[in-house]
Amino acid sequence: PNNGTVITTSIVIVTRDYPISLVNLLHVLTHQKPPTNFEVIVVDNGCVSATNAVVESFVRTTDVPMTYIPLCNNSGHGVGRYEGAKSASESTEWVLFLKDDLVITNTHFVRDLVRVGDGKGDAAGAVGCKMVRIGAGSSNKVIDARGIGIMWRDGSVFDYNVVEGDDFDFARPVDYVSGACLLVRKDAFVKYGGFDKRFSSSYYQDIDLQMHIQHDLGKKVWFQPFAVGQYKEAHNGSLDDSESGALASDDDRKVFTKKWKGTLLEYSDPPFQRGKTEQHLDLLRASDVRARDDSKGNILYIDDAIPKKSSGSGFGRALDNLSMLIELGHRVTLLTTTPSYKHKCDEDCMQSIKEIGIEALIDEKIDRFLMSRVGLYDIVIISRPANFYKTYQFLRELYMIQPFTVAYDCEALIHRREEKYVELLKTIPFPSARYGKLQGVIEILDPNKPQDVKKDKDLELAFLSMADIVITVSQIEKDVISQLSPTTNVLKIGHVMNLDKVTKSQFHDRKGILFLAAFHGSMYYNGDAIWYFINEVYPLVLQESPIPLTIAGRDIPEELIQIVENSASLSKHITFHESPDSVEPLYEKTRFLIAPHLYGAGIQYKISESLSMGVPVVMSQFTADSFKFTQDDNVGCIADTNDSFSSCILDLHSNEEKWNAYRHYGLYWIRRTHNRNNVMQEWSRVLQDGLDTIRTLRQNGGIKHKVHLKHPFMTTNMPNAPFK
């Protein structure tokens, strides 16, 4: 029965002699969550009546559409799978082949496989799961993890396997995946005529199909580590089915090598006669198709933590940048420098990062990790000055062994924020100054000591001068860097914003104003901004109109909450919203965002986010200058005094015509300046320049490079070199 469901995935299981494992497999499939639009097709090679009875019992007791196909002549596993695929629903996009003795414990197994396939769009032709081998007999001990197949130039194959570890916990394009759980596009499979009957084993049938998908159709085969299947090893230590390349016949290998002779020349030679270190790196490259693509790069991306957009502090932009690097086809390792307990990325967040195709590493010993990857990376992208400082010495030592291009994404010039802050402290008693200490570039500084701010500026200048490429988020800081360090190759790569979440509420359906920020428990920067607003500007607003204010964000400082609660005039108009699950409802119900900042660095992500949702912004002159906004841009109201800020709020909150104009021009500005394709083209140019530079340098045998040299300011107070 179809039950009216539009089927998008057809699961084909070929079975014989009614194994009890089939019952277990069908039970798990009928309890998949969330409900997925799939059907199950059981092909019976042998026409055992008991198998038909099992299928009929599931048809009666579940809502999952299920079909039984008897093949009484037992035409073989490949023929059975082809017949099952041909019987799939007309609406089916994907066919998932499962072995009848595969053990699945994950209730999201089908969803996770299809999500990777759908997520890669037309570029994906097949997806496979991670296979976990458990001990023979009653033992359930995990022996190893596998599911990534490697093809060599001579036509031999290798099942890449490891004891549980990071090598198998991120999605990637591979040579081939296990046929025990193989998701393929139905149209491509049927048009190919199913599996090539010249191969006697299903092992080479599966590999041949995946070679066709990659080299004839130009699509990728993806490994999905979050969809996990288990199987038992045989008592003799081998696999208990034909999934092992060692069990495939020599005749099959000869047929395969002859068929794909020209294509196999693109592959590498087996590395097993090389040294242990070289062999490790060769297998690492071979286990990811992107790593050995001459037109792409192996990129190491260093940042504080795993990026999550709601964390603020530039992590939204970091996630967009990483996603674009993957979309451009590069292999990316994300190495974080802070311990895992400081990360805001939970289990679901981490899975989404790794499913994109990013190797994300937490709590790694930086020196040990870098030494294990000597020679792998072509480009190292360092985000934020503190991470440059933490890793500089390690990277310098690594560079001496094998050079690479260094790209420094400075995110924001922190010393400019500090200089502006110190200047304002002469007239404004910001609450953050009461503590006498601030987090500087690399350490706590005293804003009352000019030498501390000068030290931070010198540090940032050192980083700028040592990188091959410097990336900044704003034009104004690009101009500043060009003045401070004229020889630096500096480029602007800004924010990406889609227009798929534009708010629907009209002017009269909204009320009040919004301040949205990541506070991180501190009054510095965002806390000072809203403190100044509620003390100097908001009272002017309330004298004219009781316009409500919502303050929302992560880790709102208790000091700020107490200031509001202790004021009768403020507390009845201000609402706090701590760590909202989604910011969209806030944007939907408020009339505009306020950005009253008087100091800062870089540009505010929330400004771009608000405009992309069709929500105008009232901003300080300082905020407008960071974007190079003028009143003529009409994206929001710009105020340079307390009175003009108050007037902007009162006017915009009551003027529907002006509100609609700002909304219209804000969306137009986002469409023009935050286009993902344009930003991705900028990244493409940056990376291509970096690849060209380093490959020329390597071909010439040179290692002279700015990060290799000791910068005058960096000769002291550096971490000890771990490689000496």
Image: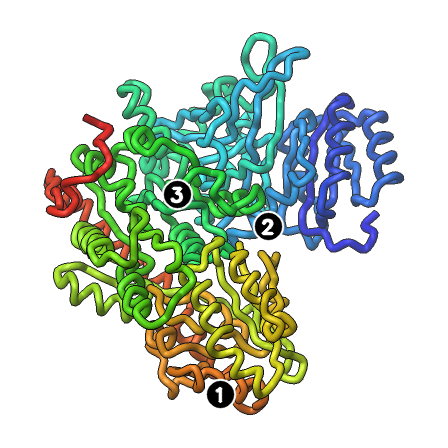
Residue farthest to the top? Answer: 236
| In the image: residue 716, left or right of residue 240 | left
For the residues labelled 1 and 2, the Cα–Cα distance comes to: 62 Å
**Disc 1 vs disc 2: Cβ atoms closer than 8 Å?**
no
Given residues 243 and 704, the one toward you in this image is: 704
Label 3 sits on what residue type? Leu
Distance between the alpha carbons at the discs numbered 2 and 3:
36 Å
Q: CA distance from mark 1 to mark 3?
A: 46 Å
- Mark 3 burial class by Cα count in 10 Å: few <14, some 14-19, many 20+: many
Residue at which label 1 appears: 647
**Residue type beneath disc 1:** Ser
Residue at screen point 65% across, 41% down: 110
Q: Tell me what residue is drawn at x 57 percent, y 17 percent.
A: 239
Which of disc 2 and disc 1 is earlier in sequence?
2
Q: Name the residue beneath numbered marker 2.
A: 187
- Residue under pointer 3: 334
Label disc, if present, on residue 27 of the rendered structure: none
Residue at image coords 44%, 40%: 360
Q: Residues within 10 Å of mark 2 (few under 14, many from 20)?
A: some
Front position among marks 1 and 2 = 1
Secondary structure at badge 1 equals: helix
Q: Callout 3: helix, strand or loop?
A: strand
Residue 699 visible (yes or no):
no
Of the 4 image quadrants, the one containing the C terminus is top left
Q: Is residue 387 left or right of residue 257?
A: left
Does label 1 or label 3 sit earlier along the sequence?
Answer: 3
Question: What SS does tag 2 mark?
Answer: helix
Query: Mark 1 or mark 3: which is in front?
Result: 1
**What is the x, y in percent for residue 376?**
29, 36
Left or right of 462 on screen, residue 138: right
Location of residue 498 in the rendering, given as x and y in whole percent from the top left corner: 49, 67
Where is residue 336 shown, x and y percent of the image? 39, 41
